[in-house]
Amino acid sequence: MANAASSLIAGLKPGDGYVQSFARGLEVIRSFSALTPRQTLSEVAEGSGLSRAGARRILLTLEALGYVHSDGKLFSLTPRILDLGFAYLSSMPIWNLAEPVMEALVAEVKESCSAAVLDGTDIVYVLRVPTHKIMSIGLGVGSRLPAYCTSMGRVLLSALPEAELRQSLEKSDRTARTRHTVTDIKDLLAKIAQVRKQGWSMVNQELEEGLVSMAAPITNRAGQTVAALNISGQANRTSPKVMQEAMLPQLLAAAQTISRTLSVQRA
């Protein structure tokens, strides 16, 4: 099925500022995932919303450039595709500076720590320092999760203007991930307003049963939220009450340290 980005592409017209073939190439790359690491031509065409002929031309181009491998039937991405993501990370030195702060936080609270940015209705992980596996979902740099039901997502959403926030929630696939997931827009707006007021977010088992997480904003020199920092743990080991009382001060201090470092770097 064509994803949301494919639908957007279908509504755009080629012009001086829009290269349709390039956009289609990105959609072919995005069709590969942890669930679809190796695909036939037909599967790529379906996943990217293209015709078989169009998908084939793009796949052959990507193969010639070294970004795709084919065994004659199945296509898969090559390690060279990591260069594209590394270009973003290397252009943002904040993450090199943030990593030791996050490592120190993990050593102190003994829970996993991550940083993410907002991309549409999702958050995208840009850095992660795990302690041990606490989720059934495998997370790493580049992983995406819905913003509406994650602690980092709500921190990032709280920085949006009200109209943009509502629009983002309306576009989100607000599927109930667990029996605790809040999906009603009115309720979500109230929770995000509370996040905006208090300056941090707590999400208790809304993304996954047993997972509790808490996040704080990372801001730039102008005070704008550019990323979020979180710690996450297992509810049966670290209750929301314990996490807030014992770890919130350390989380806020780490986020403020990274924010100050960012301000100095961009000064």
Image (spheres, helix red, strand yellow):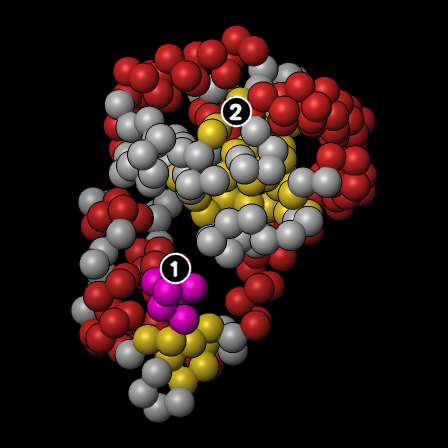
Type of the residue with mark 1: Arg
Residue 137: x %, y % from top left? 46, 53
- Mark 1 lies on a secondary structure that is helix
Residue drawn at (57%, 71%) of the image? 80
Q: Amino acid at mark 2?
A: Met
Q: Main secondary structure of the magenta part?
A: loop
Disc 2 on helix, strand or loop? strand
Q: Which residues are the magenta region?
A: 31-37
Disc 2 to disc 1, C-alpha distance: 31 Å
Nearer to the camera, 229 or 74: 229
Number of disc labels: 2
Image location of residue 132, percent across then percent down: 64, 52
Write down the quadrant of residue 57 in the picture. bottom left
Quarter placement of the N terminus: bottom left
Q: Residue at x 53, y 67 (%)?
A: 81
Q: Residues within 10 Å of mark 1 (few under 14, many from 20)?
A: some
Residue where numbered disc 2 is placed: 202
Mark 2 against mark 1, which lies toward the viewer?
Answer: 2
Give the image quarter of residue 189. top left
Tell me the residue that label 1 is attached to: 30
127, 151: nearer the viewer? 151
Compared across the picture, whether 253 is left or right of 2 comes to right
Q: Quadrant of the C terminus?
A: top right
Mark 2 / mark 1, whichever is N-terminal? 1
Using the rendered image of the protein, determine whether residue 123 is visible from the camera's viewpoint.
Answer: no
